[in-house]
Image (cartoon, rainbow, N blue to C red):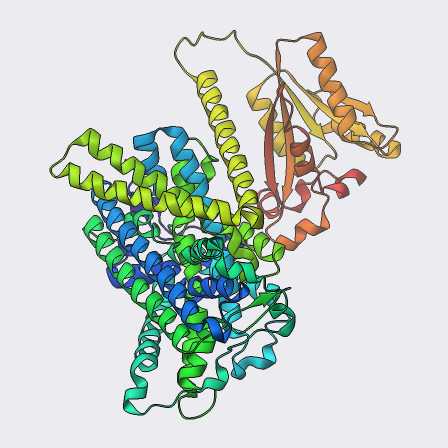
Amino acid sequence: MIEESEIESPQRESQIDTLKHVIFGKPIATRSAESTLLPKLLALPVFCSDAISSVAYGGQQILLTLCLAGFFLPQYAAIYAHHTMMITWLIVGVLTMVAISYCQTIQAYPNGSGSYIVSKSNLGANAGLVAGAAILIDYVLCVSVSVASGMQNLRDVPLIESWHINEHMVAYCLAAIVFMTFLNLRGLKEPGIVFAVPVYTFIGMCYVMILLGLFGEQIGYKFHMEYANQTMPPDLVSQINPLALASVAVLFRAFATGCSALTGVECVSDGIPAFRPPKARNAAAVLIWMAVILGTIFAGVSMLAMKFHIVYWEHAGISSPALIDQLSGTIFGKTGPFSWAYTLTQFSTALILLVAAQTAYADFPRVCSLLARDGYMPRQLANVGDRLAFDNGIWILGLVSSFFIVLKHGSVDLLIPFFTIGVFLAFTLSQSGMVRHWFVSKEKGWKLKALINGCGALSTCVVLLDILVEKFLDGAWFVIVLMSLLIFMFHRIHAHYKEVRRLLKVEGWEKPRPVRNKVVILVQSLHAGTMRFVEYARSISKDCEAIYVVIEPEWAAAIEKDWQQYVPDIPLVELKSPFRSLIKPIMHYLDELHEKDPGLTITVVVGEFVSDSWWHGLLHGNTGLILKLAFLNRRDVVVTNVRYWLFDLAAESGTSASVKSADALRANS
């Protein structure tokens, strides 16, 4: 048996591998996987940054809906505060129910308890695919929304006004996604360390802001009310429909948009394999921490918004300052002795929103790998890269989330309507699956557990229906179409892999007839490299012939003369090419051979020139590569590529080894 140390012994690296390792880091041995597992303090920022950071746009969306309906007007201030806090506490209640439900799910599925696994195990493959498609779309939108919101929270910071973020929002968002993709391609533990600082800074500054905002007046603290936006542009005020103030639909819509604060709750259960042992217990603890932090900050931000009568509006791509920006500016001031606290709050808010995408980067590739292992996505998505990360899934997430940024011009408010549908559909399927799990397993206390998960499924189902109704025309329809296309793709891929397994099965295999092999050597010039792949052709069959495509007639005579001198035992067939095509005459000749003998196996030997210097390849025609590509779709031939290194030939035979013909100068084939 070959020892692992022998496999990993230092070997000569290609220049591409060297560059790759400089950019993404050196490979991590499989046996070192345990060292990349996360403790709870690092798992919190990695898997919970999405949920915690959503307080920056979840409460903001509640205000946007109520303000556009006219509740911000001074005469409705009490109603504005009442409705905002009522919706906030309802969302906190749903959060509590979902967190308790998922703690049970984690304990029942300690090796990974995402919606796909739970739904597939208990409700069947189709339910699992619906949950898988839903959660994948949600992860993509998590990246887009979080990055866009992060940029929005930086745009009004006086310290970086010269960056003109608002004018170049898309470019800044795309740069952030590229940076996130790069960090994740370097492996999981390094982003965990990098992201811990901004996440914990954001949490700390939020609690300071909330406590000072709620109780600061009792110690004589003065607020900066000039930074609290309390009105809307006159043209928007004139568009307010008085009937909206009495419409219950407005409250349902505010609740639906505010539930965007609950995205990311499931990510902890998806990421159980990345926790240090005991995995399930640590994951459940982190989930509870996250729920407490998210619930208290979300409620505190809403209380502050009502205390200062904050108004948030958006119209035609223009909006008021972000909610967190207004609150931190009002409490700390953008100038003066505590302006540093405002700047720190805004930068930590922007950073946690940027790294909230890490939750998706951590779990999107894992869900893809699970689907791939079950045969519903390309198998390459199950492969772990050099840095023990699912590289292919990371690339896909970065590209698709960038597409949404460009599509909606980096606007948080335009991206939100696409959001939350997937996650609440996944919540509902997962919790419904857990109800069935308890009824089947009948473990100790299964009735109470089934009741808890049943309540969780019911609450998330109600939210899902509300979101579908309120957001359908705003973008929910597009998510449904996209989800349907994904499910269709899953079934097609699965059918393909199933058919491949059927066709390649060993059972019932009959011994084939003896193979009659004919070797065809493709020749463009005669030189020392040609002699190498001619010798290889002789070694695999006695039935050999060479093909030379005549493009320049004056060269043909020199080739024929040299061939007779150096390779007299192998016939040389000259194919005319009046239109200077290299590929068509060869294909036509192979067709003729098969017409004469349909049972013949033809092995085509293609030579390929290789130099030790990368730039030498730019000076040669790379015809060998072109010929290999031309044969990709031919099922009636076997292609053998024989590469010859220029300096190896010189070392073996000296410069005199080359055939001294005029055509030898064309050794770029």
x 44%, y 82%: residue: 330
In the depicted structure, whether residue 669 falls above or below residue 96: above
The percent position of residue 337, horizontal first and vertical second, equals: 40, 93
- Between 110 and 329, the residue placed more toward the observer is 329
- Between 301 and 497, the residue placed more toward the observer is 301
- Between 7 and 570, the residue placed more toward the observer is 7
x 71%, y 22%: residue: 568
The percent position of residue 669, horizontal first and vertical second, equals: 70, 39
Q: Can residue 392 be seen in this view?
A: no
Image quarter for residue 573? top right
202 horizontally vs 378: left or right: left
* Image quarter (top left, top right, bottom left or bottom right) of the N terminus: top left
585 horizontally vs 427: left or right: right
The percent position of residue 474, horizontal first and vertical second, equals: 57, 50
In the depicted structure, whether residue 627 falls above or below residue 69: above
x 51%, y 70%: residue: 312
The percent position of residue 89, horizontal first and vertical second, equals: 32, 61
Image quarter for residue 353? bottom left
The total of numbered circles placed on residues is: 0
Q: Can residue 556 be seen in this view?
A: yes
In the depicted structure, whether residue 201 falls above or below residue 500: below
- Between 66 and 36, the residue placed more toward the observer is 66
